Amino acid sequence: MPRPGHSAEEIAAKLALADELLRQGQTIVAVAQALGVTRMTYYRWRQEQQGAKADLAQRLRALERENAELRRLLADRSPTAA
């Protein structure tokens, strides 16, 4: 969970900046300094982001299953077009 000091949008923006800085070849220490956070905060944000992605993927699969079931129910109730 994000700490009170940073909103979820701020964290996402800082992690996007961190990705860019890492692509440019900067070290994690330099990236954390550029973001204005500690190295451990950076790692915690990354870990939380990965957990959020897993939760979103699980939720997406559940919604896809529900959608498929609803489509089947709708198809069963609809008169078939000849």
Image (cartoon, rainbow, N blue to C red):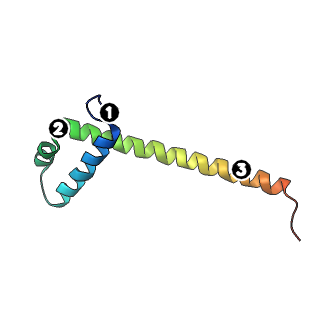
- Which residue in the structure is indicated by mark 1? 2
Label 3: how many Cα within 10 Å (few below 14, some 14–19, many 20+): few
Q: Residue 30 location, x and y as percent?
A: 10, 48
Tag 1 and tag 3, C-beta contact below 8 Å:
no
Residue 3 vs 52, above or below: the answer is: above
- Which residue in the structure is indicated by mark 2? 37
Q: Is residue 10 left or right of residue 57?
A: left
Q: Amino acid at mark 2?
A: Val
- Which residue in the structure is indicated by mark 3? 69
Q: Residue visible at 28% across and 48% down?
A: 13
Q: Residue 36 location, x and y as percent?
A: 15, 40
Mark 2 vs mark 1: which is more N-terminal? 1
Label 2: how many Cα within 10 Å (few below 14, some 14–19, many 20+): few
Q: Amino acid at mark 1?
A: Pro
Q: Quadrant of residue 40?
A: top left
Mark 1 vs mark 3: which is more N-terminal? 1
Q: Is residue 67 left or right of residue 21?
A: right
Q: Residue visible at 87% across and 64% down?
A: 80
Q: Residue 57 location, x and y as percent?
A: 48, 48
Q: Residue 42 location, x and y as percent?
A: 22, 40
Q: Quadrant of residue 62?
A: top right
CA–CA distance in space, label 3 to label 2 = 46 Å
Mark 3 vs mark 2: which is more N-terminal? 2
- Mark 1: which secondary structure? loop
Label 1: how many Cα within 10 Å (few below 14, some 14–19, many 20+): few
